[in-house]
Image (cartoon, rainbow, N blue to C red):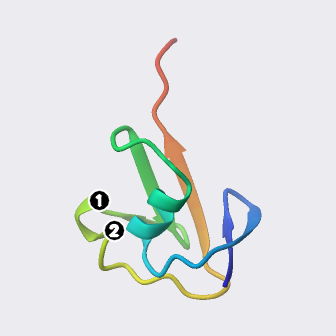
Amino acid sequence: MKIKVNNKEVETAASSVAALVEELSLPAQGVAVAVDNRLVSRADWKDYALKEGMSLVVIKAACGG
């Protein structure tokens, strides 16, 4: 299915946010995900189903100032 991740179209077989995070090899800590402009709690990633055309924003924490 095709979804958008940070405004970039991505082809994925992931069925949940957790599966997508794993597929994208994102770090286990310091990552937040919003789906269609709504923040998804990390506790809900496993059960949050992805559907064709969804738009996700992935935010990674960064050190510095």
Give whichever of 46, 6 is nearer the camera. Answer: 46
Marks 1 and 2: in contact by CB < 8 Å? yes
Q: Is residue 25 left or right of residue 2?
A: left
**Residue 51 marker:** none
Q: Quadrant of residue 9?
A: bottom right
Q: Quadrant of residue 56?
A: bottom right
Q: CA distance from mark 2 to mark 1?
A: 5 Å
Image vertical order of residue 52 relative to residue 11, above or below: below
Q: Is residue 35 left or right of residue 11?
A: left
Residue type (three-letter) at the residue carrying disc 2: Trp
Pointer 1 residue: 42
Percent across and percent down for residue 57 are 57, 58
Q: Is residue 58 left or right of residue 55?
A: left
Image vertical order of residue 55 relative to residue 42, above or below: below
Disc 2, SS: loop
Crowd band around label 1 with a 10 angstrom C-alpha radius: few (<14), some (14–19), many (20+):
few
**Residue 45 marker:** 2
Q: Residue at x 50, y 39 (%)?
A: 60
Disc 1, SS: helix
- Indicate the quadrant containing the N terminus: top left, top right, bottom left or bottom right: bottom right
Percent across and percent down for residue 20 are 50, 66
Give whichever of 51, 23 is nearer the camera. Answer: 23
Image vertical order of residue 19 relative to residue 26, above or below: below
Q: Residue at x 67, y 56 (%)?
A: 6
Residue type (three-letter) at the residue carrying disc 1: Arg
Q: Residue at x 63, y 74 (%)?
A: 12
User: Extreme left residue here?
Assistant: 43
Q: How many marks?
A: 2
Q: Quadrant of residue 48?
A: bottom left
